[in-house]
Structure formats: structure tokens, C-alpha cells
Image (cartoon, rainbow, N blue to C red):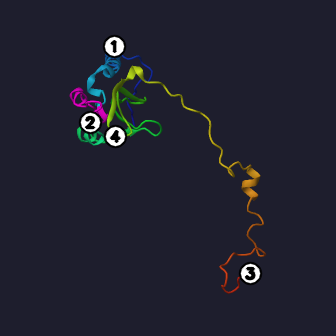
């Protein structure tokens, strides 16, 4: 049986190699240009209760009460824990970026302070530039009983339950106090 002979290691024509190089360069160029396209950006998400400038103008210190503010602005995002009773309306625009942290833009905090009678004392708008960065604490609170060595984990229950161990029962039940 005669089989046709095909050479294995012959060089390819230069024309085919150039077209593959051009296709690879074009693909690389498109790949580098795609992140700049707005088609691939995540949508902007409004978070929190955004207070409009017109709504703030309707709040008059010394006149409106908590009920008036809640009717006008809705429930606050946060209230103060200590000190003067203050309501905070926090809002921001966010965008999720692939492989990175959440991007926060246009953050706004409105703080409304009340006097002891529940009447508005002060209205203040705090922007991003006035905020303070809070560093995270890297310490971990130890939990008792979780620091066990390998030997303690392997042999920790030896002798706890066995033929001579007592099983707790309720008082008055048959066998109570006998240890069986």
C-alpha cells in the first residue's frame, strides 16, 4: 500500500505568518481598548436617602419638630447614640468595579440636631472632603477554649465518656443519682 509522503518540518509561506501576526496585533489592540469603553462600566447605584437642596430650605431651626422633619425627609439613616439627639441622612453614589473595591462618589451627609423639646436646633451638610478616615483595628479578640494543640484535639475526649462515666438525669427519674 502506497501512502503519500508529507514533509513535516517545511517552513510555512511568509504570507500566512504575517496575517496571523496582524490578527494577533489587532486582537491585542482591541483588548487594550475595551476597558476604556463605557459599555463595560457598572451602573451608578444611589444608596441612602438623598436630601435635595429644596427640602433643606424648608427646614427652619427653632420652628420645625422631629415629626415635621420625618414627614419632609423620611426616616433618618442613622441617629446619634450619645450626646445631643441628632439625625443623620447619609447618601452616596456607588459603582462596583470588577476585581476592585466599591467606588464611592458624591457622598453627602445631612445632620439635623434637635433640642431636648424635639425642635430643630441646627441643620448641617457635610461633604466628602470634611469626613475623617477611620483606621481599621487589626486585633482579634481571643475566644477562650479555641487555642488547642494537635495532641489536645486528638486526645481531648479520652476518658470523658466511658463505662464508668455518669450520665446526668433529672431528679426523681429512675436511676437518678446512681450514675448508670
Asked if the residue under mark 4 is in contact with the one under mark 1, i.e. CB atoms within 8 Å, the reply is: no
Asked if labels 4 and 2 touch by Cβ distance under 8 angstroms, the answer is no
Residue ID at (43%, 36%): 84
Q: Nearer the viewer, residue 150 or 143?
A: 143
Q: Which residue is mark 2?
A: 64
Provide the residue designation for mark 3: 177
Magenta-drawn segment? 45-62
| Nearer-N-terminus badge (3/2) | 2
Q: Position of residue 91 (x, y in %)?
A: 33, 32
Name above or below for residue 177 compared with residue 128: below
CB atoms at circles 1 and 2 under 8 Å apart? no
First in sequence: mark 3 or mark 4? 4
Q: Disc 2 and disc 4: Cα gap in Å? A: 9 Å
Q: Quadrant of residue 2?
A: top left
Q: Secondary structure at mark 2?
A: loop
Which quadrant: the N terminus?
A: top left
Report the disc number at residue 96. Answer: none
173 over 154 or under it: above or below = below
Image mark count:
4
Residue 53 is inside the magenta segment: yes
Q: Residue 64, position in %: x, y? A: 26, 36
Residue identified by numbered label 1: 18
Mark 3 element type: loop
167 left or right of 132 in image = right
Name the residue rendered at 71%, 85% in the picture. 175
Residue where numbered disc 4 is placed: 118
Residue at left offset 26%, top offset 37%: 73
Front of the two marks 1 and 4: 4
Q: Can residue 68 be seen by looking at this rendering?
A: yes
Q: State the separation of the CA atoms marked 3 and 4.
A: 63 Å
Amino acid at each position: 500500500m502506497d501512502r503519500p509522503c508529507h514533509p513535516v518540518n517545511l517552513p510555512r509561506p511568509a504570507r500566512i505568518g504575517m496575517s496571523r501576526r496582524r490578527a494577533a496585533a489587532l486582537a491585542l489592540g482591541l483588548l487594550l481598548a475595551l476597558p476604556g469603553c463605557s459599555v463595560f462600566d457598572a451602573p451608578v447605584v444611589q444608596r441612602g436617602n438623598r436630601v435635595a437642596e429644596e427640602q433643606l430650605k424648608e427646614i427652619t431651626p427653632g420652628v420645625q419638630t422631629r415629626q415635621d422633619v420625618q414627614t419632609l425627609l423620611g426616616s433618618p439613616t442613622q441617629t446619634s447614640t450619645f450626646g445631643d439627639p441628632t439625625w443623620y441622612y447619609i447618601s452616596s453614589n456607588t459603582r462596583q468595579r470588577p476585581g476592585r473595591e466599591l467606588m464611592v462618589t458624591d457622598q453627602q451627609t445631612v445632620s439635623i440636631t434637635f433640642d431636648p423639646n424635639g425642635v430643630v436646633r441646627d441643620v448641617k451638610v457635610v461633604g466628602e472632603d470634611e469626613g475623617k478616615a477611620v483606621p481599621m483595628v487589626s486585633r482579634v479578640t481571643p475566644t477562650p477554649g479555641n487555642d488547642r494543640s494537635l495532641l489536645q484535639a486528638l486526645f481531648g475526649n479520652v476518658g470523658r465518656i466511658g463505662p464508668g462515666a455518669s450520665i446526668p438525669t433529672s431528679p426523681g427519674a429512675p436511676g437518678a443519682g446512681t450514675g448508670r
